[in-house]
Image: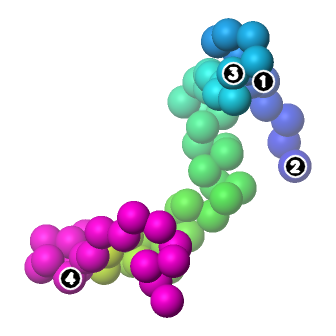
Amino acid sequence: MASMILKIRFPKARVQKLNIELDKFAFERLAASFGFFNPEFIKSIHRAEKDYTAGRVTKIRSLRDLK
């Protein structure tokens, strides 16, 4: 796996958030390693957009709503 340089900052002490800064090349490598450029993933994104525009999307408030 290729190495990449990341800048990670914690905004305030004891906060459970962090900021990660990437340049565009590091982001592309990260996306490729997650498989975001996989043709099947791209097709699933297009299907999801069609479902959203057709109104076949339901908002959920918690995972318990899926039961």
The reply to whether residue 12 is in sight is yes
Magenta-tinted stretch: 49-67
Q: Is residue 2 above or below residue 18?
A: below
Q: Which of marks 3 and 4 is nearer the N terminus?
A: 3
The reply to whether residue 46 is in sight is no
Q: Which of 65 and 48 lies nearest the eye of the viewer?
A: 65
Q: Which residue lies furthest to the top in this view?
A: 12
Identify residue for label 1: 5
Q: How crowded is mark 4: few (under 14 residues within 10 Å), some or many (20 or more)?
A: few
Instruction: Report whether 45 appears left or right of 20.
Output: left
Identify residue for label 3: 15
Callout 3–callout 1 Cβ contact below 8 Å = no
Q: Given the image, on which type of amino acid does mark 3 rest?
A: Val
User: Regarding mark 1 in the picture, which secondary structure is present there?
Assistant: loop
Q: In this view, does 16 lie above or below 37?
A: above
Q: Which residue lies furthest to the left in this view?
A: 54
Identify residue for label 4: 56
Callout 3–callout 2 Cβ contact below 8 Å = no
Q: Given the image, on which type of amino acid does mark 2 rest?
A: Met
Identify residue for label 2: 1
CA gap, disc 2 to disc 1?
A: 13 Å
Q: Residue at x 55, y 61 (%)?
A: 36
Q: Given the image, on which type of amino acid does mark 1 rest?
A: Ile
Q: Earlier in the sequence, mark 4 or mark 2?
A: 2
Q: Which of marks 3 and 2 is in front?
A: 3
CA gap, disc 3 to disc 4?
A: 37 Å
CA gap, disc 3 to disc 1?
A: 23 Å
Res 47 quadrant in image: bottom left
Q: Residues within 10 Å of mark 2 (few under 14, many from 20)?
A: few
Q: Residue at x 79, y 31 (%)?
A: 4
Q: Where is residue 58 in the image (x, y as percent from the top left)?
A: 27, 76
